[in-house]
Amino acid sequence: MKKFLTIVILIAVVGFAGYLWVSSWTYSEGTRSGQLIKVTKKGVFFKTNEAQLNMGGLRTSNVEGLEGNIWDFSIISDEVVAKLNALEGKRVKVAYKERYKSMPWVGETNYIAVDVTELKN
């Protein structure tokens, strides 16, 4: 019985480590631009930096009809958070990496901002 329990625990630990490893892979990279409308730090157990970008236009929602084209993303780097705070309300271009799955201590979304630049009109 002790050997069986050890094997089960070992499989669970290796499986969880593998899940963490795979979820950190970058699925895609790119940029999005729009007006930065919100930068916040939130969470009950894990405080993460989150932001919203209004990319313009409208999109349809099954529940509410038309809604703004808002993109939610997370930020890990304190340097990028500081840049975003300084640019709130302005038009920006955000470079990001999309992960397969973001862990709760990383962010609420799978999109992780890696850089931001202000767009001049």
Image (cartoon, helix red, strand yellow):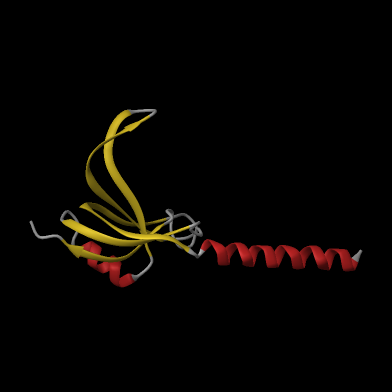
Residue farthest toward the right in the current orientation of the protein: 1
**In percent of the image, x 50 and y 65: which residue is there?**
24
Q: Where is residue 99 in the image (x, y as percent from the top left)?
A: 45, 59
Residue 17 lies, with reference to residue 108, above or below; the image says below
Q: Where is residue 15 in the image (x, y as percent from the top left)?
A: 68, 63
Residue 10 falls left or right of residue 84: right
Q: Where is residue 115 in the image (x, y as percent from the top left)?
A: 28, 67
**In percent of the image, x 82 and y 66: which residue is there?**
7
**In percent of the image, x 29 and y 72: which residue is there?**
79
Q: Quadrant of the C terminus?
A: bottom left
Camera-nearest residue between 10 and 48 = 10
Residue 90 falls left or right of residue 72: left
**In percent of the image, x 35 and y 70: which residue is there?**
77
Camera-nearest residue between 14 and 47 = 14
Residue 61 lies, with reference to residue 75, above or below; the image says above
Give the total of numbered labels.
Answer: 0
Residue 65 falls left or right of residue 25: left
Q: In which quarter of the image is the N terminus?
A: bottom right
Residue farthest toward the bottom in the current orientation of the protein: 79
Q: Quadrant of residue 111?
A: bottom left
Q: Position of residue 14 (x, y in %)?
A: 69, 67
